[in-house]
Structure formats: C-alpha cells, structure tokens
Amino acid sequence: MRAIREASAPRPDTARLASRPVQATTTIARPSPRTATALAVVLGALLGLLSRLEETASGLSLGISSNATWLAVAFAAGALQRRTIVPRAAAAGALALTAANASYYAWIAATEPGTELASVAGSPFVWLVLGAAGGAVFASAGHLWATQRAVVRVLAAVPLAGVCIADGITALTGGPAADAVGLAVGAALPIASAASAVQRTIGAALAAR
C-alpha cells in the first residue's frame, strides 16, 4: 500500500525547477540609530586626537587633519544612519565633529601645558560652531547618498568630492604627495556613485519582473 501511495503521489517537475533562476539574497546588518550615533562620536573623538598627533609628529603628513578627512567622517556618520531620517543623521554628524574638536583641544590642554588653545588653529568656539554646522550638512549628504538612488545619490556625493579635490590640488602645486589621494577620491566618488545607482536601478527592474 505504501508503495502505491508513493507511486501515485505528485512529483515536482524537476526540469522546470532546474530552469528557474536562483536568486541569492544577502542581508547586511545595519546598526540602530543609537549605535550609529555612538559610533560616530567615537570616530570623531579618535579623529580629533589623531589629527593633533599628526600635526605634532615631525615629517608625518597623512592628511588626517585635512578638511576632507574631517568632513568625510561626518559624511560617514550620516551614511550609517540609514534607519532614520535626515535631521537625526545631521545631528549625528554634528556630534561627530563636535567630539573631534573637543578631543583635539582637550589633548592640547592635557599634553601641551602653556599653549594657548586659540594660538593653535584659531578660536575653539569658532571651530566648534563650524564643526557642528559642517557636520550636519555633510552628514545629511551622507544619509541621502546611502538611502537614495539615481541622480540624488550622485548629487549627494558632490560636496564631499569637491572638498577632496580642493584639498588634493595642493599635490599639484608642491604640497605633500599624500594629498593626491584627495584628487583620486574626489574624482572617483561621483563616478562610483553613478555606477552604483545604475546597478541598483537595473536590480530593481529585474526584481520587478
């Protein structure tokens, strides 16, 4: 009886199953808004510390203290905030660069006694304001870059690309050779963003079929 049931049971069409395309799915873990904000603050604090260490190290020029690097951290802080809205991403960027400025000047106060903070790179208050404003703007761009498609994604990459190129120009005028990295990143970022946007569009079209 069992043999009869197995023989009469419907069997899948193996040829049809074999002809179906197998779609691989990849799940990328995204940090929660709180975790992303905490990470941005930690990165900002490290950035400020490393920037001052670079400035005081003889013969060391890695571009850590450059405008492009600082604003890239804010951009990344916004890109990490994929699970929230633009204002919260902007706040994360502002916090990141505020932490960077705070650790920068705190390190000077702790390790360089007698040094007036305003004599190093200008008024700490001015840099705190500029850092918060710039962090908010570039984090907003980073958030749009990470969450939007097509033209918006490319346009969101333009501000950071422009800063990278502006910093990298010095490599062509006798500045450190390391500054040439900024030129390469500035040129590649919009192109890579456009290619990614096209790939996403094609993927969405194929998924809708």
Image (cartoon, helix red, strand yellow):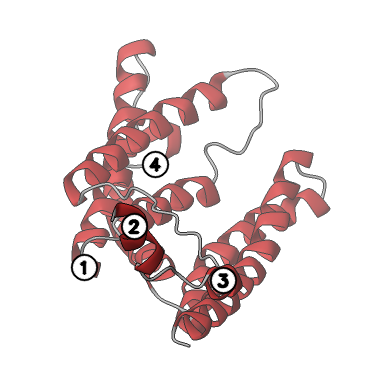
- Helix, strand or loop status at disc 4: loop
* Label 4: how many Cα within 10 Å (few below 14, some 14–19, many 20+): few
Do the numbered discs 1 and 2 sit on residues whose CB atoms are within 8 Å?
no
Q: CA distance from mark 2 to mark 3?
A: 36 Å
Name the residue tied to disc 2: 78
The amino acid at mark 4 is Gly
Q: Residue at x 82, y 46 (%)?
A: 174
* Label 3: how many Cα within 10 Å (few below 14, some 14–19, many 20+): few
On-image quarter of the N terminus? bottom left
Observer able to see residue 21:
yes
Q: Earlier in the sequence, mark 3 or mark 1?
A: 3
State the residue in front, 43 or 177: 43
Q: Earlier in the sequence, mark 1 or mark 2?
A: 2
Q: CA distance from mark 4 to mark 3?
A: 61 Å
Q: Is residue 179 left or right of residue 161?
A: right
Q: Residue at x 50, y 59 (%)?
A: 24
